[in-house]
Image (cartoon, rainbow, N blue to C red):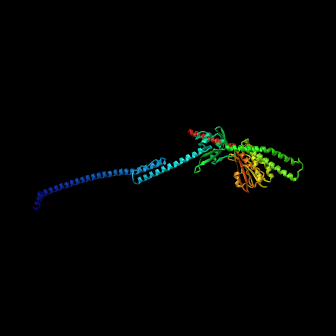
Amino acid sequence: MDIARSRAVYFTQLEPVFHQLRGRCDRLLRLNQEAMRAKAEAAAGVARLWFLLTLAIAGSLVLAGLLLAVVLSGNIVRPVHELTSATAKIASGDFNAQAEVLSHDEIGLLAIEFNRMAEYIRQLRRSDLGKLLVAQQTTEAAIDSLYDPVLVTDARGRVTKLNPAAEGLFGAEARNTGRFVWEMAHDDRITMAITEALRWQRPVAGEGVAAILPLTINSEQHAFRLRTTPMHDEDGRLLGAVMLLEDITHLREIDRLKSEFIATASHELRTPLTSVQMGIHLLLEGAAGTLAEAQHDLLSTCREDCERLEKLMHDLLDLTRIEAGENPPHLRSISATALLQGAAEALRAQVEANGLIFTVDVPLALPRVRADHLQIERVMANLVTNAVRHTPRTGEIHVTVAQRDGYIACTVADTGSGIPPQYLPRIFDKFVQVPNAPAGGAGLGLAISKHIIEAHGGQINVRSELGRGTTFTFTLPVPSHAADISAARQNDAQSHRESEEL
């Protein structure tokens, strides 16, 4: 009964309430779920909003950072670029360039100091340039004021400067500047002097007749002596050459008058000297009666003195003729071996008669030279005779010949007493005699030999040591040497013309 009533109550009262309560719980659950879903969607929307906002802010910050970096880098790099550009301009020679001061920071201070340095460089350059200009003007004024002609070339032999005196010989400076010397010069000796000074890089100065250059100025004949010197910079590099043509016309006139006087005096003395010699010879032959021994000795001494005086007069006449150019060498092609071997062997008897050892070393394959064999034989005789006079018995005399660069060199060496050092610079001057030397010479033989060798285009020099002997060396040019120089000169001119055409 109770169970049925309970069922009835349950199904009539409690079940509907239960269903109602469950429905309301379900509705509450759905409302709760909807509310949670709405809140989740709202939170997702807010999150998306903040994400986008954060992304926008981050992008803005990145853009702002990039813009700031560009601005800052521009402010830093632009002054550095200005400094670099100004430095490059100054390095290229634009000393008026300045760096723009864009700020007052460290870069700005650096730009200010850079401009100050550039201004100092400009002032220094203006000062050095002014000094260089003054020095150049002074140098040019000094060269232009010289009475003697001056010719300046570069290292290739092209003319760079002519003073007014030189323009009178070679033409206007503007017309000749840049031309090779051999295209402008009127005499091969000028070309040879410049060529040798540039090639060997040493001064070239001749003293003999061959070094005298006759040139015409304003229809008047003048005589010039060549002086050529190479120019070098501080590092020793060859810059060019300077040639001075020393006008010695008045000296030549004095020499001419002196030579005429000596020639006249020698000629006037020859007649009475010949008479004296003939009289002494007749007396010695007994034409005036028998002579006592003392008389014979006295007359023999007089005859020797007359012979020495006659030789002195002969040498004086020869020297004056050579100096005046009246006795030029008669050049002809001859074998150097035959010339020098024959000249030396002709003196062997004289040398060995004085108890000396005489050796001659002449190669058989020497080239031919252009020479006057009589004058060269005279030079050989003078040198060997001097050696005989200054070498004691059992001494030695050596004649040695060798071929050098474009020259034939002949050396006469002895083992005699030697020459004091103070006399070596003047040993080739006239009438110079070494003290305590054996009698018999007048001091003209070496002077004559020097003139003869220089007239042949060669040189002569001496080396000596007291007690050890003396060595004389003279040279004769080989004709092909001059031809080589001429060919080289033509090649240089051709190269110059080709470079101008290019």
Q: Nearer the viewer, residue 39 or 159?
A: 159
| Quadrant of the frame with the N terminus | bottom left
Q: Can residue 455 be spotted in the picture? A: no
Residue 336 placed where, x, y %? 73, 45
Left/right placement of residue 153 relative to residue 7 reads right
Residue 393 placed where, x, y %? 79, 55
Q: Is residue 189 above or below residue 389?
A: above
Residue 351 placed where, x, y %? 79, 51
Q: Nearer the viewer, residue 392 or 488?
A: 392
Which residue is most to the top?
A: 219
Q: Is residue 497 above or below residue 443?
A: above
Left/right placement of residue 458 relative to residue 165 reads right
Residue 337 placed where, x, y %? 74, 45
Which residue is located at x 81 percent, y 48 percent? 306
Which residue is located at x 61 percent, y 40 percent? 168
Q: Can residue 312 be spotted in the picture? A: yes
Which residue is most to the bottom?
A: 2
Left/right placement of residue 144 relative to residue 322 reads left
Query: Number of callouts in the render?
Result: 0
| Quadrant of the frame with the C terminus | top right
Which residue is most to the right?
A: 289
Q: Nearer the viewer, residue 343 or 402?
A: 343
Left/right placement of residue 103 relative to residue 386 reads left
